[in-house]
Image: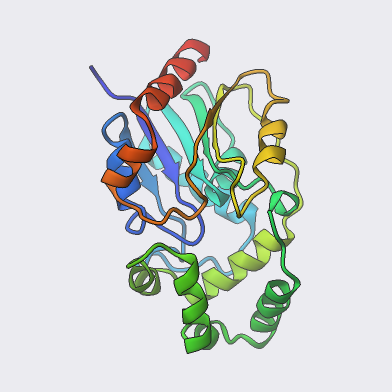
C-alpha cells in the first residue's frame, strides 16, 4: 500500500537533523518530506528580514519545487504557524498540527527577561557572541533533549535563533483555518503553549480530529524508539482515517 506524502516543517529551535528520530518514526506511516527553514540548517543562509510571512513564502516555494500531486501538510510548534499561513489547493489533503504555536498569546509564558534579552541582542548585533556564551549555553542545555545541543550549535545560526525568538514573542496574527481537515496532536499539560486554549481554538473549526498525548513540547528524548513508545500506532491510524474520510 502506498504511504501518503507528509510535508513537514520543524519546530523552533530545530531542523531535520535534530528531529531525525521523529521523522524516522513518522516514515513508518508516511513518505516524509522535511522542509528546513533558512538559518536552521548550516547549508541555508538566514533570511535577513525574519518575519512569519517570509518564512511562509520560503515554504510555499519549496512546496512547489517538490511537485507532489497529493500531500498532507504538517508543522511542529512554530512550524505549524508557518505551514498554516501557506496558500494550499486541492493537492493538500489535510493539515497536521503537532503541539502548534498559534501566536504569542497562546504561549504558556512570555517572560519579560527574554523579551529584553532578544531586543538587546538585536539592537547591538551581538547574536553570535551571546549565543555561544557559557551562560546562554548552560540555559540552552536545560531546554533541549540530552545530546542535541552540539548538533543545534552546528546547524542553527545565532542570528536566526534570536531574531526568530523575538518574532515569536511578539507575533499577534490570529490563525485562519483552511477548508481542510485538521488533526491536532496536543498535550493539555504542555509547558510551552497553552494546551487547553489551543484545543478550544481548533474546536471552532468544523473538520478537526484531536489526538491527546502526554508528550511535552520538548521531549526528553528524540529517537524513533521513544516516539514508538509514546505515540500509539492506533493514534496514527486515526490520523490517516480522519484525513482520508474528510479530504
Residue furthest to the top: 245
Q: How is the image coloured?
A: rainbow
Q: Is residue 84 above or below residue 108?
A: above
Q: Is residue 8 above or below residue 131?
A: above
Q: What quarter of the picture does the N terminus occupy?
A: top left
Asked if residue 94 lies left or right of residue 236, the reply is: right
In this rendered view, identify the residue nearer to me: 80 or 106: 106
Asked whether residue 136 appears in the rendered view, the answer is: yes
Position in image of residue 5 (x %, y %)? 35, 30
The residue at 55%/82% (across/down) is 127
Position in image of residue 138 (x %, y %)? 48, 80
The residue at 44%/29% (across/down) is 72
Position in image of residue 177 (x %, y %)? 67, 30
The residue at 70%/62% (across/down) is 169
Asked whether residue 49 appears in the rendered view, the answer is: no
Asked if residue 85 lies left or right of residue 12, the reply is: right
Position in image of residue 180 (x %, y %)? 58, 22
Specify the quadrant of the image occupied by residue 231.
Answer: top left
Specify the quadrant of the image occupied by residue 241.
Answer: top left
Residue furthest to the left: 1
In this rendered view, identify the residue nearer to me: 215 or 158: 215
In this rendered view, identify the residue nearer to me: 178 or 239: 239
The residue at 35%/53% (across/down) is 222
Amino acid at each position: 500500500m502506498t504511504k501518503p506524502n507528509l510535508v513537514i516543517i520543524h519546530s523552533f529551535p530545530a531542523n531535520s537533523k535534530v528531529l531525525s528520530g521523529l521523522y524516522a518514526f513518522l516514515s513508518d506511516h508516511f513518505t516524509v518530506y522535511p522542509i528546513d527553514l533558512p538559518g536552521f540548517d548550516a547549508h541555508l543562509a538566514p533570511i535577513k528580514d525574519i518575519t512569519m510571512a517570509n518564512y511562509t513564502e520560503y515554504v510555499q516555494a519549496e512546496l512547489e519545487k517538490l511537485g507532489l500531486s497529493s500531500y498532507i501538510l504538517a508543522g511542529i510548534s512554530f512550524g505549524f504557524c508557518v505551514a498554516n499561513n501557506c496558500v494550499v489547493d486541492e493537492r493538500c489533503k489535510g493539515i497536521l498540527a503537532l503541539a502548534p504555536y498559534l501566536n504569542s498569546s497562546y504561549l504558556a509564558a512570555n517572560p519579560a527577561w527574554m523579551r529584553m534579552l532578544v531586543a538587546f541582542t538585536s539592537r547591538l548585533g551581538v547574536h553570535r557572541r551571546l549565543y555561544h556564551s557559557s551562560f546562554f549555553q548552560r540555559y540552552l542545555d536545560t531546554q533541549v533533549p540530552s545530546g542535541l545541543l552540539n548538533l543545534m550549535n552546528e546547524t542553527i545560526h545565532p542570528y536566526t535563533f534570536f531574531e526568530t525568538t523575538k518574532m515569536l514573542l511578539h507575533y499577534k496574527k490570529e490563525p485562519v483555518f483552511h477548508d481542510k481537515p485538521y488533526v491536532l496532536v496536543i498535550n493539555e499539560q504542555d509547558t510551552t503553549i497553552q494546551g487547553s486554549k489551543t484545543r478550544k481554538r481548533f474546536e471552532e473549526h468544523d473538520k478537526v480530529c484531536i489526538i491527546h498525548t502526554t508528550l511535552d513540547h520538548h521531549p526528553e528524548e528524540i529517537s524513533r524508539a521513544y516516539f514508538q513508545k509514546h505515540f500509539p500506532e492506533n493514534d496514527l491510524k486515526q490520523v490517516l482515517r480522519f484525513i482520508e474520510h474528510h479530504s
